[in-house]
Image (tube, rainbow, N blue to C red):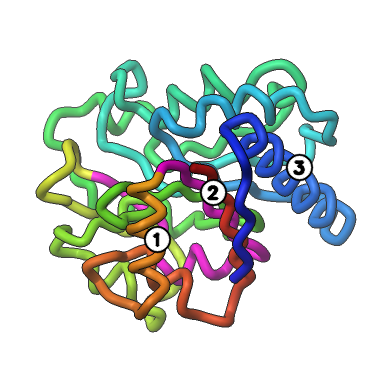
Amino acid sequence: MRQIELNDANAHVGALVRAIACELERTLSDKGEVCLAVSGGRSPLPLFAALQQQSLEWDRVSVTLVDERMVPFSHEDSNARLVCDALLRNAAAQAAFLPPVPPYCAEIADIDTSAVVAELNRTYRQPDVVVLGMGEDGHTASLFADAPELPAGLSLSEAPGYLALSPRAAPHKRVSLNLSALLGARRVLLGFSGAWKKQVFDAATLEPTPALPVSYLLHQDRTPVDVYWAP
């Protein structure tokens, strides 16, 4: 694990954008194509605004999400909608988008999330570069400490892919990449800011604990993890 401390929000975004672009270019050089998995929520909006301007071979880039809420595409909490509105613009409009939840699924009442996950894993494509955030409770992706499905999500005996989660303290049912999938990437980039999140992160560096699911990313030597944070 490598930690990079930045002075402010602008430096934080700039460093992350450069790191993502570098990893995408490196993978394109090696493989000819690349799959980028990003996080949703409001925190990545400045990152997306800067990343969409990068001069990359976006037509050889596929973008997906590390997690998604089981809501319609039109819903304000839809991560897919956020990515389409905030990232897949300008130069990045040429990228292919692979939403974890097909738009028609979330429109159906009482959708069987397990059926969605089964289809996702049948056609699963391993992301090459994963960009993660971290919540103030130590969750990352939708691997929440209070989700009954967390043990399966953190088990490295599980095949890389998605799983369904039902966190008690967060709205909506979710689908999320499991830990095996996150660590199946060539590189993981974790970004966060703020003094409280730094305290949570520091606690997570002490030992792996399901109370802070992000800790499992930090206590492994399978995949390089670069941590970008700012006060």
Q: Position of residue 171 (x, y in %)?
A: 17, 37
Label 2 crowd (10 A; few <14 / some 14-19 / many >=20)? many
Look at discs 1 and 3 and give the one toward the viewer.
1
Residue under the point 26% across and 29% down: 71
Q: Position of residue 143 (x, y in %)?
A: 30, 58
**Mark 2 highlights which residue?**
229
Label 3 crowd (10 A; few <14 / some 14-19 / many >=20)? some
Label 3 sits on what residue type? Arg
Look at discs 2 and 3 and give the one toward the viewer.
2
Numbered disc 1: secondary structure:
helix
Query: Which numbered disc covers residue 26?
Result: none
Numbered disc 3: secondary structure:
helix
Q: Which residues, given as a range, are shown in magenta?
A: 174-194
Label 1 crowd (10 A; few <14 / some 14-19 / many >=20)? many
Residue under the point 43% across and 36% down: 40
Left or right: residue 179 versus residue 138 is right
Q: Taking 110 as reference, is 117 above or below it?
A: below
Residue under the point 78% across and 33% down: 59
Query: Which numbered disc covers residue 201?
Result: 1
**Residue 146 location, quadrant:** bottom left
Let me know if residue 164 appears in the view. no
Label 2 sits on what residue type? Trp
- Alpha carbon distance from label 2 to label 3: 14 Å
